Image (tube, rainbow, N blue to C red):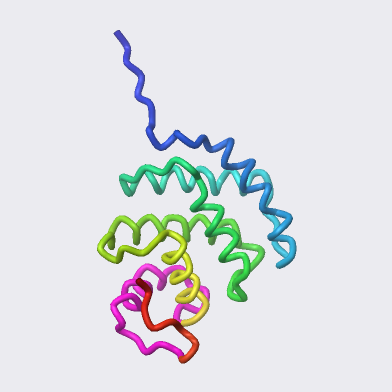
Amino acid sequence: MNIGIISINSAFPAQTEKENILGLNGKLSENGLIISENQALSIAEARESSLQSNGRIEFSGKTAEKIILEFGKSACIDRDTFADTVCELIDIFYYLRNGYPETRLSDDRLISVMRECFDNECAGDTDLLADAVPDRLAGKRKKSPTEPESYE
């Protein structure tokens, strides 16, 4: 008897997520960005891969959409590498969510803190982001006067 393995991460299929991502192009175009069909599929597949590699389950697919919209407003985003950057940001998000559950931040707040770090101390460098976010949450760097007092 052959028992097939079903990925629990497929609760929100990549094709469905691709369509949802493409639906964001109206909002993204306000910032001069656009995601092609191939890029949308790559982002959806990157999300699924990141979920699997981090041992996480997500049913809605909204996290990728929130990351796309939040970082699409960043002055540090290069439109030529936007989709690739989004794939990296998704992976960083799940890494941080998995590695630092004690922060008890909502997904929206974690994405917001990621964006603040990305725009400021990381200057758009995703290689620095995975370390910058925990440092910021731990209060290891001086906050600017416009930043909130607490991330909880």
- What percent of the width, then of the height, locates residue 31? 71, 67
Residue 82 image offset from top left, x and y in percent: 60, 61
In which quadrant is the C terminus drawn? bottom left
Vertical placement of residue 8 versus 121, above or below: above
Above or below 133: residue 121: below
Residue plotted at (40% across, 48% down): 50
* Number of numbered discs: 0
Image vertical order of residue 55 relative to residue 73, above or below: above
Please tell me in which quadrant of the rendered image residue 102 appears: bottom left
Q: Residue at position x 46%, y 56% from top?
A: 90
Q: Is residue 8 magenta?
A: no
Name the quadrant containing residue 92.
bottom left
- The residue furthest bottom is 145
In magenta, the rendered stretch is 121-144
Q: x and y percent of residue 130 in the render?
A: 37, 68
Q: Is residue 129 magenta?
A: yes
User: Left of 38 or right of it: where is 67?
Assistant: left
Quadrant for the N terminus, please.
top left
Q: Residue furthest left?
A: 102
Q: Estimate the x, y position of residue 67 in percent, counting from the top left.
A: 53, 59
